[in-house]
Amino acid sequence: MADRTETEKRDLAKELAAAVRGEVSFAAADRALMTMDASNYRRVPRAVVAPRDAEDVAAALRVCREHGVPVVPRGGGTSIAGQATGVGVVLDFTRHMRRIVSLDPAARTAVVQPGVVLDDLRTAAGAHGLTFGPDPSTHSRCTLGGMIGNNSCGSHSVAWGTTADSVRELELLTYGGERVRAGRGTDPTGAPTGLPPRLRDGVKGLVDAELALLRTGYPDLPRRISGYALDALLPEKGTDLARALTGSEGTLGVLTEAAVRLVETPAARVLAVLAYPDESAAAEAAHTLLPHRPMTVEGMAADLVGDAAGLPKGGAWLFVEMGGASPGEAAARAQSLCRAAAADGSTDHTVVTDPAGQRALWRIREDASGTATRLSDGSEAWPGWEDCAVPPARLGPYLRDFRALLTQHGLRGTPYGHFGDGCIHIRIDFDLLTPPGIRRFRDFSYDLGELVVSYGGSLSGEHGDGQARAELLPKMYGPELVRVFERFKSLWDPAAGLNPGMLVRPARLDENLRFEVLPARPVPVEFGYPHDNGDFSAAVRRCVGVAKCRNTTTGPGSTDVMCPSFRATGEEQHSTRGRARLLHEMLAGEVITDGWRSPEVHDALDLCLSCKGCRSDCPVGVDMATYKAEFLHHHYEGRVRPAAHYSMGRLPQWLHAAAPLAPALNVLARTPLAAVAKRLGGIAAERPIPPLATETFTRWWWRRRKTAAAPPPSGGRTVILWPDTFTNHLSPEVGRAAVRVLEAAGLRPLLPPTAPLRQPGGALPQPSLPRLHRPPLCCGLTYVSTGQLDRARTVMRRTVEVLSPLLRDGHPLVVLEPSCAAALRTDLPELLADDPRAAQLARSVRTFAQALEELAPDWQPPRIDRPVAGQTHCHQHAVLGDAAERRLRERAGLTGRLSGGCCGLAGNFGFERGHYDVSVACAEDQLLPAVRESSTDAEILADGFSCRTQLDQLGDRPGRHLAEVLAEALGEPG
């Protein structure tokens, strides 16, 4: 039997490869990437095909049909009901079929392929003052094909409706190979237009036979997404076949092209934020705002929003966007709405006219599908009942009953969503890991299905039924209409080859859960994973698949970092989600079978820059840099490592040893011997070797202390200045500048000793020359980034030993290099979870600007009055925050914003052989363009050594640390 299965697999692979011009993969890694979407479900496909065009789709369908293999169309993979997963061949439309075929501004229509990302269409239409109306929160990565498959909606549906309202024509291929051009209207026989004879007669006959049921069987509400929209085929509704097929979840035909309607965007938008005592009051009020013709009416409560700035005081809020022909008109409409809302229960309001302020608030809403997966106490919460909808006027009482049902079942969740359309999103703390928890999930689902139906609602109000809700469709529509759905499916797909198990004849809602394959007990790991109770599986489970990491562009004013490698390659395996999926499958052991030794996981993580951008930008805080370090530790345990791990992973050791030989080594770095050294060290041939400092920062410091005519400042607060490896050996001018500025601000910087202090009472030592043969203090960053966690822990323990007596009295630790500050703030306490002194050290870390703001608040920096350009360090963005830096720049008259993203060098990453092209592509994403486009008098800021090195090697304008800029402006010391 196994031999026969392998033969069938080889035959299928051979025939697909011969028939399809796009990529065909049976590889474990590619299959593993497609096992899940953003739902609770998991299925392992046989193969992944990336068709180049409609002919490729037809060829793939023909081969699969001949082999009896099902087909699953897939776009961005952000579906939350499981409909983008399957056991057959997955058609991935995001690789090639992502072309906007045409855009007609006069007719306000566009023709698109299914893989077109929504934001790409919106950008193209925006040049003509148009947009595509539906805009789910995943607009930066969801595809038009997926939106049509699910009948997606989004926050602007109160103004522009659902995707079905925006579809004009659909071109599809059935599993049997028939071509369909679905539109609106009938042919001379009275059948829907665009159907081949077999389907034309069958569809007309089915509709004619069931006219009464189709006219009475559907609830009347704006967000009715569940089931097949067969009522769209009624003659009084225009016999709209395109509308009927929208929301069919790839179960009837495979979309190859779509003509869609565009809408005019208002010239100005204003956001009114209305406060209410609680979410029930907000829900009660939402529908009363609709007569004011808002563009959005979105609801959120305090348990989701937290301490977000810019919100009026309240327990829940409605975000109501108003448009107008001018900013004044939009603001006037918003103020009028606020007055009406105040008379109807709103306790406070604010009107946000600033686009940046609006974006900041909308980001809270757009990230909710991720942030809601972790409750305030850290508990996991999951989709499953993400988007049921009721008539808007009944939302208030429904929401109260919904909360009561949660309590009855001992469950918790955070409702939010499209209150103006009666549609509620929620992630619920289902226990999907144990049999009792799964039974509770099933029981609750049945009870909630009854509740939704009792309010005249729809099981799905946006994301489709898939496997999550299709089992309950008889509750909503009754068994008779569900049988009509089944007959409709059989007409289109008699072989049941398209997305089987979805929408009709579904699998049970508690089958194929993605968690059941994970280890029952935590696996042994090195990091503490404090936010996941030490469980690596729980850390990996953080990725729910909303795929914010698949953003290929950054919007206006964006400072996001995640995910630079995906933006460089466009490959799913190089996204944070893709890597998390592979780690999930590694733990499962079914598709990825080599555990920690997996080459598939290694290859995916190889291009992870360890930028930590996902730690802050991922709505659920996936920390792929830590997961990569963990994986590399186990992957190479007991084995020879790549040369770069020895050369750059142990950089602090080499630089310490090389310091006395720096002049000679700098000369050798400019000779042919450098090429040999780079080859032996696993360093990219394209990379020049940075020059070593001929006098390290620490040597300068102790020489200065020994020879200084005047004693150091005595009245100011003492700070411990951390001599990180990069500043000490490669950029000592940054350290010297920082000392100059800190002392000018009245602070007393001291360098730590190189060995633990053994003084009674823990008094600070008087400055003296250190013993230079001692190993240097180190944050462990290079060891962590290469997965040498045993060595990292050793150097970190020594650092804790030395620093703890100095920090015991509350002395802050000022760190100039952002990557080292981030390592001390996060990696050190997470690797030394058993040592309480590690947490104390982490709390003491301050950036240069944070130290000045906190310890010298009255100091006035010198006025520089110049624009700035450059990039906020990715680790600073992700771990430390840059608010203090922005305020310090403002006080010094350094105006403008720094770009987001990652420089691409990222410590050892850009120096490693094989990474150069991706490193350059990352730099070209945001950093280099920002510098090129800046004015000639702009100060180029780059606080990280990697960022400055990348600018030196790829750009034509060097960057400097903020400390250098301020020190220069101070002039010569008196």
Image (cartoon, rainbow, N blue to C red):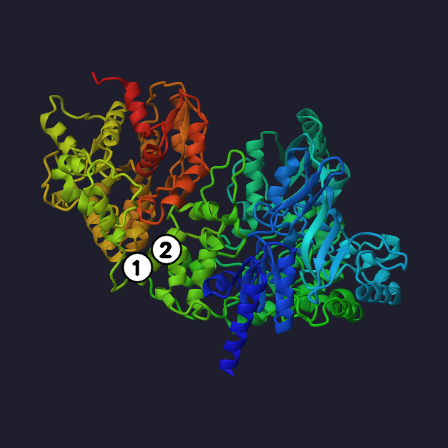
Percent from the top left, x then y, of residue 42?
A: 54, 66
Side (left or right) of 121 relative to 430:
right
Q: Residues within 10 Å of mark 2 (few under 14, many from 20)?
A: many
Give the vertical position of 511 relative to 348 (above or below).
below
Residue type, label 1? His
Check disc 1 and report the residue beneath it.
633
Disc on the earlier residue, 1 or 2: 2
**Snapshot quadrant of residue 178:** bottom right
Percent from the top left, x then y, of residue 610?
A: 37, 48
Q: In this orientation, which residue lies closer to the viewer: 524 or 684?
A: 684
**Snapshot quadrant of residue 588:** bottom left
Distance between the alpha carbons at the discs numbered 1 and 2: 8 Å
Q: Is residue 347 visible?
A: no
Give the vertical position of 346 relative to 580 (above or below).
above
Q: In this orientation, which residue lies closer to the viewer: 367 or 933?
A: 933
Q: Secondary structure at mark 2?
A: helix
Check disc 2 and report the residue beneath it.
628
* Residue occupying image coordinates x 80% and y 55%: 220
Give the vertical position of 626 relative to 88 (above or below).
above
